[in-house]
Amino acid sequence: MGKKEKQVKEKPLEKLTAPELREIARQLPEVTGASGMNKAELISTIKKARGLEETGKKKQSKVSIREIKAKIRELKNKRQNFLEQDDKKMADIFRRRISRLKKKTRRVA
């Protein structure tokens, strides 16, 4: 009797773990820096490299969390400078901006 060969179906990218996605990304020559990416970044990068469309359920934001956090760090430094100069009003303005950006990161995540 002939053996049936099982066809290996590839799992959807969303179902794979981050290490599995990194392994796939390393095999693609267009992808660089896969080891520093998180799962969402890996999925979008692999899809772009394969020429697939993004069919995400969430509405993609224009700004990434990393960009927002970089802006928060920058504002914290400016706020610290104003605190050292005893400019409470400007320090409070920067505190509110930082708080707003932190809320934005939670919404984007």
Image (cartoon, rainbow, N blue to C red):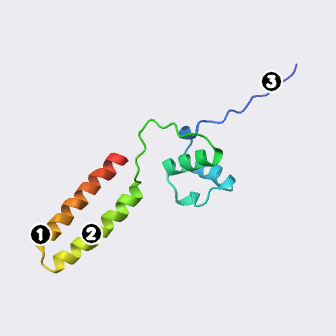
Residue drawn 23% across and 60% down?
97
Locate residue 47 relative to residue 74 in the image: left or right: right
Residue drawn 17% across and 75% down?
83
Residue drawn 49% across and 47% down?
40
| Distance (Cα) linking label 3 and label 2 | 63 Å
Disc 1 or 3, which lies upstream in sequence?
3
Label 2 neighbour load within 10 Å: few <14, some 14-19, many 20+: some
Check disc 3 and report the residue beneath it. 4
Check disc 1 and report the residue beneath it. 89
Any mark on residue 51, and which? none
Task: Tell me the mark number nearer the camera, choosing from 2 and 1.
Answer: 1
Locate residue 73 relative to residue 12 in the image: left or right: left
Check disc 2 and report the residue beneath it. 76
Residue 74's x, y, as percent?
32, 69
Contact? badges 3 and 2 (CB < 8 Å): no
Q: Quadrant of residue 78?
A: bottom left
Contact? badges 2 and 1 (CB < 8 Å): no
- The number of callouts visible is 3
Q: Say what amino acid the circle numbered 3 marks.
A: Lys
Locate residue 86 relative to residue 56 in the image: left or right: left
Task: Tell me the mark number nearer the camera, choosing from 3 and 2.
Answer: 2
In the figure, 47 relative to 85: above or below?
Answer: above
Q: Secondary structure at mark 3?
A: loop
Q: Residue furthest right?
A: 1
| Distance (Cα) linking label 1 and label 3 | 75 Å
Disc 3 or 2, which lies upstream in sequence?
3
| Distance (Cα) linking label 2 and label 1 | 15 Å
Q: Say what amino acid the circle numbered 2 marks.
A: Lys
Locate residue 12 relative to residue 40 in the image: left or right: right
Q: Secondary structure at mark 2?
A: helix
Disc 2 or 1, which lies upstream in sequence?
2
Residue 63's x, y, as percent?
40, 53
